Image: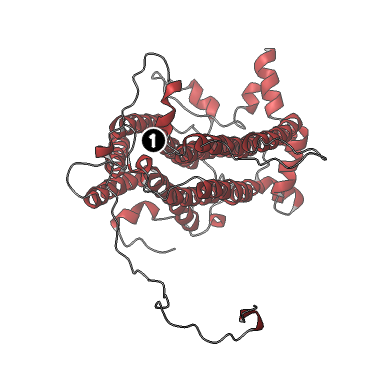
Amino acid sequence: MTTGNLTLVLTAAVATGLGTFLMLPHRHGRVRSRIWLVLGGALAAVGAAAFGLLLTPPTDWLASLFFYGFSLLAFAGAILMATNRNPVNIALFFAAVVLSTSGLFLLAGAQFLAAGTVIVYAGAIIVTFLFVLMLAQSEGHALYDRLARSPLRSSVVAFALLGGLLYAIVAVKAPQESMPAAESEADTAVVPRLARGSDLEAKLNTLTETGPALVYRMASTPTSRLIPESVERAVHGEPPPHVAGLGGTLFTDHLLSVEVAGSLLFVALVGAAVIVAPRRPIRPGERGLVQSTNSR
Amino acid sequence: MPPPFLPALDRFAGLPLLAAATPGRAFGFDILTNYLLVGAVLLALGMLGFLSRRNLIVMFLSAELMLQGVALTLVGFGRYHDNWTGVVFTIVILTVAACEAALALALILVLYHRRGSLDVTLWQDIRETGVPPARERPEEAEPIVVEPGVESYPRLTPAGVEPPHPRQPWERRRD
């Protein structure tokens, strides 16, 4: 944990926290709120720059460009989402955050998940939110949109959490390339290192206890290993099909999860239909009764 | 490879333009750290939105933002350990988020119809015993700024002017 990293973490947490506190909907004295918005935005931009310096660039320019673009779009979208006054704008900034996380999924190689996130989140969930906002909203002038609940305490708590998480993530050192050699060195200080699953294979195959051995064997079945592209090209001569591998693992290793998720969707559908429209059904032969909506 | 022309771009010096120039593990530990950092930011900002806003719908959207951060963390770890489990669990989370959105919005609509407002502080009667209620101080709210825009007034016919003769058959008087 270098001092430079610690400084960046503190700068990011404190600057973003202070900037977001100034931007939250709250009357800060007699000054016009536009000034506080600009000041808070400048502080949050400083925090974003510190955060951007904490990220390490990927191995090529194009991936760096996209990665930094998506990360900073997610950061900005989240801040603007938390501090806007109009709920429709908040839903649209959430759509921007969803698109940037979808881009990050694509950069990590999860192509199906990128498409699925855009379709389900940006295409279904946000549209549902906008419909409900249309039915139940008073255009951002309501008191509950112009006033935040205890902005100082919530900002302090959220950015204490952010600082702690950033510190914990940045403090973990990269694993050495050859793990057994590093273990045998005289490493007196206990330094947290994160080993990769495939590196541990040789070591964990020698496990004799049933618990860890069983878990490891189940986690490393052939259908659940992501085959690296270089191996796939060497063996088959073509890039690996992502959706085929994902389908293979979903329907062999995680079949029960898939069925449970389907049942959950069905139950939620029935539940939502029952909760929203509890009307007494008109049986055939009855005269149509005048039904009023839920009492206001 | 474009040369760095600003000192801040020195960290990109020496990088090739495309990944094909450097074979090897594309998703190393540093990229994993990147994903975890972005996920942590989304989680913390979602928590800030959840704690500090009063609108029920906005609180729920902030909870969904926290779920996005968690999904990024899961996908990062899954790719780092060369395992599908991260992606599969994110798909399950996506499903659960869709169900949760449907049910939560249905409940929010019912609550709105009961009180006529989306304010969460109206429902403080169900808070924990021993916790004082949060007082609402309207003088601390931001004032509504009405920005004068271009107003378009409707064109009304002046009173007393006879309308033109009926042009269509259904505009004729039928006595």
Q: What residue sits 62% from the left and 32% below the top? A: A198
Q: Is residue B169 above or below residue A90?
A: below
| Outermost residue, front side | B175
**Front in this rendered view, residue B134 or B5:** B134
Q: What residue sits 75% from the left and 39% below the top? A: A282
Q: Residue B43's x, y, as percent? A: 45, 36
Q: Is residue A127 above or below residue A205?
A: below
> Is residue A57 at all visible to an observer of this figure?
no
**Front in this rendered view, residue A269 or B98:** A269
Which residue carries the number 1 mark? B48
- Chain that bears disc 1: B
Residue count near mark 1 (Cα–Cα under 10 Å), binned few <14, some 14–19, many ≥20 = many
Q: Residue A169's x, y, as percent? A: 42, 32
**Front in this rendered view, residue A170 or A35:** A35
Q: Is residue B21 above or below residue A225?
A: below
**Front in this rendered view, residue A292 or A199:** A292
In the picture provided, is A67 more to the left or to the right than A261?
left
Find numbered disc 1 in the image and state the secondary structure of the residue it sits on. Answer: helix
Q: Residue A59's x, y, as percent? A: 48, 51
Give the residue type at disc 1. Answer: Leu
| Outermost residue, right side | A285
Q: Residue A292's x, y, as percent? A: 61, 40
In the picture provided, is A248 more to the left or to the right than B88?
right
Question: In the picture, which quadrant includes the C terminus of chain B?
Answer: bottom right
